[in-house]
Amino acid sequence: MNPQPPDTAWPGDPAPLGVTWDGAGINVAVYSRSAEAVDLCLFDTTPDGRYDPSSERRVALVERSGAVWHGYVPGCGPGQRYGLRVDGPYDPPTGLRHNASKLLLDPYARQLAGDLVLDPAIFGYAADPYGMRHDHRDSAPHVPHGVVTAGNFPWGDDRPPRIPWSETAIYELHVKGFTKLHPGVPKPLRGTYAGLAHPSVIEHLVSLGVTALELLPMQAHVSEPRLLASGHVNYWGYNTIGYFAPHPGYAASDDPVSEFRAMVRQLHEAGLEVILDVVYNHTAEGGEEGPTLSFRGLDNAAYYRLTPGDLRRYADPTGCGNTLNITAAPVLALVLDSLRYWVREMHVDGFRFDLASTLMRDSAFVEAVGQDPLLRDVKLIAEPWDLRGYDLGRFPSPWAEWNDQYRDCLRGTWHRLTPSLATLATRLSGSADIFSRRSPTASVNFVTAHDGFTLADLVSYERKHNLDNGEGNRDGNDSNASYNGGAEGPTNDAKIQAARHKLRRAQLATLLLSAGVPLLVAGDELGRTQLGNNNAYCQDNEISWVAWPYDRRDPAGPDPLLVSLVSGLLRLRRRSPVLRRTTFFRGGRVAEGDVLVPVPDISWFRPDGLPMEDGDWQGDTVTLHVSGQALRARMPHGERIVDDSYLIVLHTGAADTIITLPGAPWGRLYALLLDTAADDLGGFPHLTETTPLTAVTSGEQLPVTGQSLRLLRVLG
């Protein structure tokens, strides 16, 4: 047990913010411009590690430098549980909601312990969130606490993989859901950081060929009271309360910080990058009716955007109840400090910013990140929209962006709902209409994501089935551009199952052959289904968890070729620069140095093998030729990069068809590498690497199955 602390802290220092252990005690620094008193509250734990609510000791922080309250407490060290109590005006009409009865989390806490328990005491107000009465009940037994950490870790020679954007393939996963059912992971480690770092899991990821894991929110989060009241939880985690702390619920040990670091070290060893999905647009405190957990009680008017003319209410462009006031310098500093911490101390490789439009609007956030010598060199990915705005294509270099127009085009075209070969051609070639000021790698291409149908459900359901969420099937998107093939959900109809297999493979192949950065969703290659639920944010169960070795509930029917398809195409991308371009296509015949390239870098053909003209884009079949002889990228010493050339045949129509292969100068002999309509590995010769290549000559007619893709290499 730590020595008894003094009633009043020593002066300490106003920086750094948060709680910092120096080997002899802790320095505490807390930002609040409107507080009248700040106490550090220390708690003991019982011998079995449980919180002892009767042990609270309060230490007054009486020193104040500007808006920072600070002090030093000797004798406190790692493992100490703590919180804050802040006294000051409770006056919602002026935006102030101080309440010393509520235990508050330190915004800079490195580790959290304990869960949010639904109890009236967690709310700062009495009866009316818009009114003047504050609640006097003590919230300490019902809210998470901070834990003092040591900060050291044996990183050894860990180095970031620093994989170029052009070689990146992202795999979005949920830390818990990815391994919760994995038979190769020991049961105590399933669903944890340690489980994600297990050799059996890493083996799958490496063999699949992805290069970066995008982890759904794993900064400490809690569930909304309305979910707790209905028996649900916020499974996805987009409800952050601790921006410096790994979520304790994903730890197999009582040291989530070290366990997370060990996971990163193991993934780096395997050559995998770690990207965090982060939520700096709002917090878990919600709107006026939400609990008082941290920021609201520290300095409500400083941390949150309030409604002009009615400061009792919160501005809400996120749709989540509140919005962090990132336009304020201290709040912007909090976000930047958090990002730097995850890069410098936790060794992560990048971030995907949820509702990034909220961060960009009226703030210096994007500029600050771009000027930061540490942050500007990691991967930065924007979700470029929120409820108030749509900003796809507006983020500057070096940002990449989730391209929902790619998603919508692929779904609409392949499912024959909004077929447009011209738009599909633009998306396949890198979306230059959106990202022309950057490069194709600014476009993060995806067909599915955590939000919406899984790939198996996308080709099996045309209606959402979200009743398990307890919201009367009103939640979730009603427009999914999905196609069930003639039956809603599972079916034994072999014809419908075959059609679903074709559609899945065609969309995956299109994704992995498109210019840009592909994003895959964990379990899509295993046939993961959510049983038609397109908004499984509150389903911490087998609806959301990944099934291994494949999902037997797959409504499209198990397809053992999906893993081979993905791994084979990712392998082909790695060795073919023409399939992972860093510059946009120009479409014309050009000179490369002293070499006159015989064909354009990209060419489009009609089914009869002749070049496409303006009036030819209304059909359902197109062939594109990408030339490995016309790459503008150069090797480090300026040498030309010369690659293979490929033909990609996309036939989105339902009926089978026949195309004619283009002749010279585009090619005279072609090798068939992939037919997504094939029902065995004979249709995937490039995947087995032992099957003889099937050669076909220019001018020859090639049969193409309905709703399928064929890939050929130009042999000469």
Image (cartoon, helix red, strand yellow):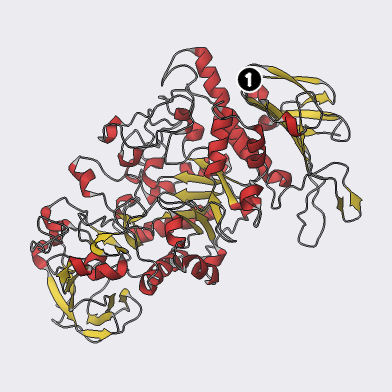
Q: Residue at x 68, y 25 (%)?
A: 619
Question: What's the amino acid at mark 1?
Answer: Gly
Q: Is residue 402 left or right of residue 24?
A: right
Q: Residue furthest front?
A: 309
Q: Nearer the viewer, residue 593 or 155?
A: 593
- State the residue position of label 1: 706
Above or below, 237 against 565 in this view is below
Q: Position of residue 109 (x, y in %)?
A: 30, 67
Q: Position of residue 387 (x, y in %)?
A: 40, 50
Above or below, 58 against 320 in this view is below
Instruction: Write down the quadrant of residue 476 in the picture.
Output: top left
Q: Nearer the viewer, residue 700 or 44?
A: 700
* Quadrant housing the C terminus: top right
Q: Residue at x 44, y 28 (%)?
A: 457
Instruction: Label 1: state its secondary structure.
Output: loop
Q: How many marks?
A: 1
Q: Is residue 337 left or right of residue 691?
A: left
The answer to whether residue 109 is visible is no
Q: Residue at x 62, y 52 (%)?
A: 435
Q: Position of residue 475 (x, y in %)?
A: 32, 37
Q: Residue at x 40, y 27 (%)?
A: 463
Above or below, 365 against 204 in this view is below
Q: Position of residue 173 (x, y in %)?
A: 44, 44
* Quadrant housing the N terminus: bottom left
